Amino acid sequence: MVRRTAISELREHPNLAEVVGVLAQLAHIRDADLPLLADAWSNTVAAAEARDRALSPDSPLVLEALTAFEALADLFDDDLRGEAAYVTVSCDVTTTALKAIRDAIAAAYAKPVLSRGDYELLMRPWRAVYPGSAVAEPDLGPRAEQVKALLALFPVLAGRCHDAEGRRMYDALVDRSFADETDRADARETAFQAAVLTSRRRVWALVRRSGTEALSRPCRSCGGRLPLEDRETERVMTLCLDAACALLVADTLPDATTELLTAPVTTLIPRQRGASS
C-alpha cells in the first residue's frame, strides 16, 4: 500500500537536504560525468515500477519534481541537440544520463512514500557518481551576491502593474535596452564563450531560466501575469539576463566587457527596495 504524506511546500519536505543537494548539483554536472551516469543506469522492470510509484499523484510535490525535469532539459538543451562545437558527449549518452538524473530527482522528492528498496534502486546510478551532496546551492561564482541581487530585480519588474518602483525601473530599462545593441550582442557572445571555457555554461542556462521564471510570476496585488512575448518585455529580460550572466563569469572577462553588459542594469539595483550596491 502506498503511504501518503501531506507536504505543501519544499521547506516542509522531510528529505529537504537531499532534494536541494540533487537540484543544486544539476548545473555543475561535468561532461565527464555523463558517460558514468549513463553506464550506471538500466531500465529494469523493478526500476520502472519504482519510477511509476515515485511519480504517482500520491507522491509529495510531484509537480515540483516534474518542473525540475523541465529545468533539467533546459540545462542540457545544447547537449541534446549536439550541434555546438563545444558539445563533446554524444546525444545518446546524454539522453541516457538524463534518465539517471531524473530517477534521482524523483526518488529524492518521493522518498517519504517509497520503500527503502525502491528509493535505493532509483538513487543508485546517481550515488555511483555523486556519493554525497557536493554543493548546498548552485555556485554562482565569486560575484554570487551580485548575481542574486540582480535576480531579485525580476519579481519587482513582474509586479510593475501595481508597483510604482517596478514600473519606474522597467521603463528605465526599456530606454537603456536600445543603447549599444550591437556591442552588447558581441559582448554576450564573449561572455558565453567564457562560460563554456570555464565549464559554467549550464549555470549560465540556470541563471537565464531562473530570471525568466521570476519575470513570469503573477503580480502579488492582482494575480495577473504580464506577457513575456511583447517586444519591450523581451528587451528588458534580455538586458537583465545578460547582466546576470556577465556577473557569473566576470572573473574571466575583460572589465570593459563586464561593464558594458552590467552597467545598464546594476546602476538601478541600489535604488531597489531592500537592495544594496
Image (tube, grey):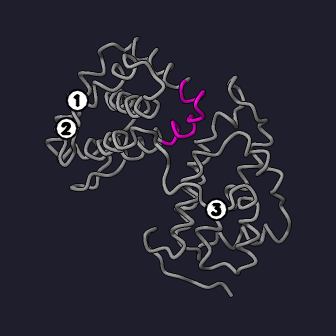
Cβ–Cβ below 8 Å for labels 2 and 1?
yes
Cβ–Cβ below 8 Å for labels 1 and 3?
no
Q: What type is the residue that disc 3 sits on?
A: Gly
Check disc 3 and report the residue beneath it. 132
On screen, residue 21 above or below 84: below
- Residue at the image position 35 percent from the left and 44 percent from the top: 145
- Residue at the image position 42 percent from the left and 46 percent from the top: 213
Looking at the image, is mark 3 or mark 2 earlier in the sequence?
3
Check disc 2 and report the residue beneath it. 270
- The image position of residue 154, as x and y in percent, is 32, 42
Question: In the image shown, does 251 or 150 lie closer to the viewer?
Answer: 251
Label 3 SS: loop
State how far apart marks 2 and 1 are (Cα): 7 Å
Label 2 SS: helix
Which mark's residue is nearer the viewer, 3 or 2?
A: 3
Residue lying at the far left in this picture: please name it: 164
The mark tally for this picture is 3
Badge 3: residue crowd in 10 Å (few <14, some 14–19, many ≥20): few
State how far apart marks 1 and 3 are (Cα): 40 Å
- What's drawn in magenta, residue-wise? 194-206
Q: What type is the residue that disc 2 sits on?
A: Pro
Cβ–Cβ below 8 Å for labels 3 and 2?
no
